[in-house]
Amino acid sequence: MFDVFTEEIEVQIKTGISHLYWFKEDLRKAWLRSGVAPGLCNSIFSRTGPDSKKLTKRELMNSLYIELRGSDINRRLEVSRNFVRILTEHNNFVPQDEKHRVEIAERCALKLREIIAQQQKEAEYRDLIRNKVQRAKKEDYHSQLLPLRAHFYETVKMDKQKRGYELEKIFSKLMTISGIPVEESFKIVGEQMDGAIKYDGHYYIVELKWIEKKADQKNVASLYMKVEGKMEAKGIFIAMNGFTNELLSSLPKGKNLKVLLLDGIHLTNVISGIYTFQELLEHAISHACLRGEIYCSHEFLK
């Protein structure tokens, strides 16, 4: 079926359908089968022209499309696709009268098949190009991920203070190659921000912690305070060594969830190429929205 509804398709439909049916009652039935509302159908068929004569079949089709253009576009597409289906699937163009120019409907059906075939060919070409671009992006992403992965594994061996700074660089680079807008670490009065990202129309303030101990309530509360002071902001807290049991047992559920908790396993899986950061975020967001839990599992792609 056609992907793009054009003026040429409309002309072929109006010409083809009006010549396919010799009797107006058969045309009326075709309208109803195609999804034209009975009230609209009756209204148009009861109309007369300037000479007080009943409308011709082509005039009926013109009147229908004037009405359809003023209605919901999905309804116009539905009716038009059904008309096209009637014409293109018809295989017995037999005249009902010596004046019945059914061959015109046959030519319209042939032209519609050509238009549909051309649109399908163009759609296949666009899909081919889109797939090539996506493959190229994926290959480029993984080629850029390799040196970042090596950098990350080197960072693991560093002392705790230095690896914290390196983690900010790694995260910023990871967002860049992932196609996620990122703001690097910055300061405002009284606050230090490790960075921020924009995803799906929302800004997320990011807190990165790579300390010997697990992150506790005090650490996460700091991010909550930063998020609360920003218009419609959300937060992502990434604790490389995870979170204390006390924190996990006291996490808020169900209401006003503004912060997502991720740990070193999540980030390592992304850097290792097991899943992308976008896939991780989608999982974490759905976990929070559907389960009311802000700390998500690691097994979601297995």
Image: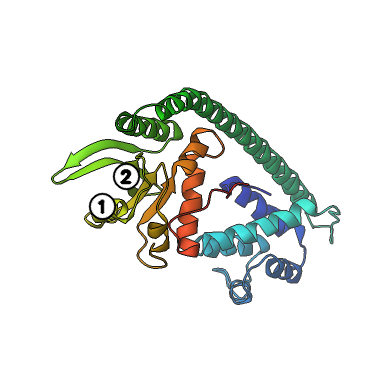
Q: Amino acid at mark 2?
A: Glu
Q: In the rendering, at what x and y percent does residue 246 appear?
A: 39, 59
- Please state the horizontal and vertical placement of residue 134, each as a whole percent of the image: 56, 33
- How many numbered discs, if any? 2
- Image coordinates for residue 40, horizontal then vertical, percent: 59, 73
Name the residue type under label 1. Ser
Q: Residue at x 36, y 55 (%)?
A: 259
Residue occupying image coordinates x 47% and y 24%: 150
N-terminal of the pair, mark 1 or mark 2, is 2
Q: Quadrant of residue 74?
A: bottom right
- Whether residues under marks 1 and 2 lie with C-beta atoms below 8 angstroms apart, the answer is yes
Relative horizontal placement of residue 179, taking residue 123 as reference (left or right)? left
Q: Which residue is mark 2?
A: 207
Left or right of 135? Residue 288 is left
The residue at 38%/63% (across/down) is 250
Residue on which disc 1 sits:
222
Q: Residue at x 61, y 52 (%)?
A: 10
Q: SS of the residue at dot 1?
A: helix
Q: Is residue 107 above or below residue 54?
A: above
Q: Nearer the viewer, residue 14 or 136?
A: 136
Q: What is the crowding at mark 1: few (fewer than 14 residues within 10 Å), some, or many (at least 20)?
A: few
- State whether residue 202 appears in this view: no
Q: How is the image coloured?
A: rainbow
Give residue 208's quadrant in the image.
top left
Bin the neighbour count of mark 2 within 10 Å (Cα to Cα): few under 14, some 14-19, many 20 and up: many
